[in-house]
Image (spheres, coloured by chain):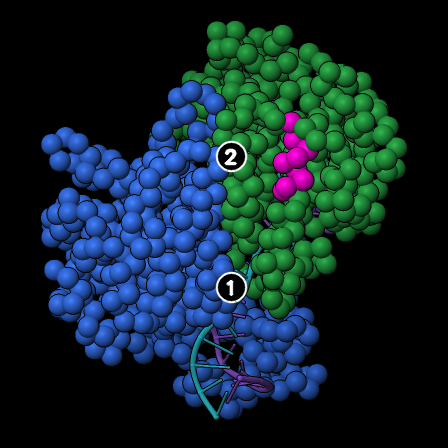
Chain colours: A green, B blue, C cyan, D purple
DNA sequence: GCGGCGCATGAATCCAACG
DNA sequence: GCGTTGGATTCATGCGCCG
């Protein structure tokens, strides 16, 4: 379905905000620059871009056990020179700048192979960098030959259209998400795997699928419900799936038919959250801290439930007053018992303790998020 | 004391490695580009650089000729300003490239204001990026206005002189430092404060003094004792103080007299570590090599002994000359036969092949360790 | 059904010395 | 310079099999 058909789908489109010509909630097949050129100026609230990294990999790499490392060798990641990569980068970033609303922002993710070139281009094109964000990978691939530091992170750039531009930043939502501390510029997430990783016949569909948690935090931080999000390197549609879940409108541009097919199936299966769950936190006064005990009081976690850490090395039982009790005799708050059993000076109980749900371990912080989303007006 | 005096001080200087013309363990006063131009080519093992971060925050900016650039905020001049910063960056990076030994490396630290421009320049000048490292600040300054994410990190770039260049990386030291796990690309340190922070009349001497722990890890990872480290933006001399402590030679370039005075006092007070304390975990490859045949010669393993892998899927017989012979016809070194029987591109015979001892399988590498322990003084 | 073990795998710019 | 060879090198996670 091409951009020229100008079809509008979905529920939340508001004429005042969203030009009717936008092909919302669709994947546009083709080259990202050409497709962006067909979109109207100042029509998009946010752009998330995961462009080719230009990895410049050499020969084959083997693990110490002799197994072969499946590298990113796709044609779409190959560029002859830095100059070619720069020209491509500046071309799509310039189109992105034209399409963005004046109060819109752009996110770009990359690694040291490309992010410096991307960042310089972002600045040269007049964008104003608001933050660089580090995605710390909880489980990165090791450096098998012992020749460098483990490459354990990727970098994201967040920028507005210019120095004086206004932009959306849901400060309270981020602070709430971070246990009432300001959200920092370093975020930790696992790489995309398990049930979230799209596979076909047991083989990963896309070599670099991003975790939904990453997009969830970005969209929650920098967009409002109903906002239009464009992903010019859509891949298997993580941006679209999370946007649908969070009640945002989305557009994706992708060249590869296999990726498009996987993305469409995935997004069709995604469930939007309740309207009520989407309200973001507004002011500190209307947003008190959530005590762990409140979750117990409200039935999010039953007294007697056993909590464990991710490695099941320690456990503790939830008591009726919201305190924990461990078999070794430690009692107190989720934070205190967490630090005591570990012998650590401090511990964030919200992320340390996990409960069993649908056969998987989930941090109790997830329950707090559920609670907050459900109770905030 | 100027560079032209060509004084050599200190203990570890080796004529073969360190040209006598280097002004070692000194601060050179003046413009960093001019001072670097006076240093001989290929004479420095490592460069650590903490350049001015940027112009838009009102920091100092100098053109390649050393003249001062007035801060400007006009939109039209922003490009002009970036261009000047880029020219300055490329000028000092080019000199640094000339001064570095072919197996030397460079470190540059920066924030999102400048690091993308620096990184692009590093790549354009032919350096080969080895890692980007994130310094996660344990105690960053909060974002007081609640308009962005807390800027809680800075970025370092580590690069060799070119794609094929060799370089020093003390892998074992880093792994040991990190509790026997590979050192990752994200490091956490507190910002410089407390007794480490240099103050004069209660006021901090330098606005961006770096923590010694950061330099400690960098020098430990990428230099050997006696190596020459240059810091072209010396400031209050963190690089010099740590280099002295770790038994490395250093050179600093700095323009401001106040910084120089503070740095000289600080470095004079720094205590070098003991030789014994400087010893770090060594990679096995820097231990004396032991040929497998030596073990046979010395009776650690008798000719005719059958070796097997851990799962007893393959076996091979030890021959008198230290080669192996497998039933399938493969002959040669322990590595070659190991790779041949597996059909693998490579194999570490020392860990692949096992012998039977007391009813258990032990790797032949254990015999090598025994031999080394028995024969090393 | 549960726990333990083995195996697969992830945006990776991944060797050095010698003849 | 290039081909050959010695030999050094991995962490977290999810899944499936087996006892």
Going by the image, does B263 lie left or right of B214?
A: left
Does the residue at mark 1 contact the one at mark 2 (Cβ under 8 Å)? no
Q: Secondary structure at mark 1?
A: loop
Separation (CA) of disc 1 from disc 2: 39 Å
Residue A318 coordinates in the image, percent (x, y): 53, 18
User: What residue is disc 1 on?
Assistant: A145
* Residue B211 vertical position relative to residue A181 in the rendered view, above or below: below
In terms of depth relative to the viewer, which is nearer, A26 or B358?
A26
Element class at badge 2: strand
Q: Report in which chain the residue with disc 2 lies.
A: A
Pick the front one: A104 or A150: A104
The numbered mark at residue A128 is 2
**Relative side of B291 to A7, left or right:** left
Is residue A95 a member of the stretch shown in magenta? Answer: yes
Expressed as whole percent of the image width and height from the top left, the position of residue A173 reads: 55, 19
Identify which residue is drawn at 55% across, 80% down.
Answer: B334
User: What's the mark number on residue B131?
Assistant: none
Of B301 and A308, which appears nearest the observer? A308
Q: Main secondary structure of the magenta part?
A: helix
Provide the chain ID for the residue under circle 1.
A
Magenta stretch encompasses residue A258 = no
Which quarter shows the C terminus of chain A? top right
Labels 1 and 2: the sequence-earlier one: 2
Tell me where residue B267 appears, x and y as whole percent: 15, 52
Horizontal side, residue B218 vs residue A71: left or right:
left
Instruction: Tell me where residue C16 appears, x and y as whole percent.
Output: 44, 75
Q: Is residue B176 visible?
A: no
Range drawn in magenta = A93-101
């Amino acid at each position: 379905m091409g951009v020229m058909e100008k079809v509008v789908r979905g529920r939340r489109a508001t004429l005042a905000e969203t030009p009717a010509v936008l092909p919302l909630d669709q994947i546009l097949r083709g080259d990202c620059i050409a497709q962006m050129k067909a979109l109207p100026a100042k029509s998009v609230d946010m752009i998330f871009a995961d462009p080719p990294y230009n990895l410049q990999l050499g020969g084959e790499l083997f693990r110490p056990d002799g197994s072969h490392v499946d590298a990113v060798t796709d044609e779409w990641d190959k560029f002859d020179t830095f100059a070619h990569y720069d020209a491509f980068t500046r071309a799509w970033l310039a189109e992105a700048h034209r399409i963005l609303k004046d109060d819109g922002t752009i996110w770009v993710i990359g690694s040291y192979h490309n992010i410096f070139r991307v960042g310089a281009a972002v600045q040269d094109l007049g964008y104003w960098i608001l933050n660089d964000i580090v995605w710390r990978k909880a489980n990165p691939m090791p450096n098998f030959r012992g020749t460098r530091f483990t490459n354990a992170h990727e970098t994201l750039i967040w920028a507005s259209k210019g120095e004086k531009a206004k932009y959306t930043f849901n400060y309270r939502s981020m602070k709430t998400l971070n246990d009432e501390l300001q959200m920092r510029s370093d975020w930790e997430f696992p790489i995309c795997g398990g049930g979230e990783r799209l596979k076909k016949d047991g083989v990963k569909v896309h070599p670099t699928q991003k975790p939904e948690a990453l997009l969830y935090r970005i969209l929650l931080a920098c967009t409002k419900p109903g906002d239009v999000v464009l992903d010019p390197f859509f891949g298997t549609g993580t941006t679209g799936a999370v946007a649908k879940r969070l009640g945002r409108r989305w557009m994706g541009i992708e060249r590869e038919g296999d990726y498009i097919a996987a993305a469409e199936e995935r997004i069709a299966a995604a469930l939007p959250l309740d309207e009520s769950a989407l309200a973001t936190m507004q002011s500190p006064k209307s947003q008190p801290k959530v005590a762990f005990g409140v979750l117990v009081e409200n039935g999010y976690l039953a007294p007697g439930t056993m909590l464990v850490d991710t490695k099941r090395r320690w456990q503790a039982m939830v008591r009726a007053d919201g305190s924990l009790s461990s078999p070794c005799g430690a009692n107190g708050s989720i934070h205190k018992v967490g630090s005591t059993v570990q012998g650590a000076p401090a511990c964030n109980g919200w992320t340390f303790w996990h409960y069993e749900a649908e056969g998987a371990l989930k941090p109790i912080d997830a329950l707090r998020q559920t609670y907050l989303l459900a109770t905030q007006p």
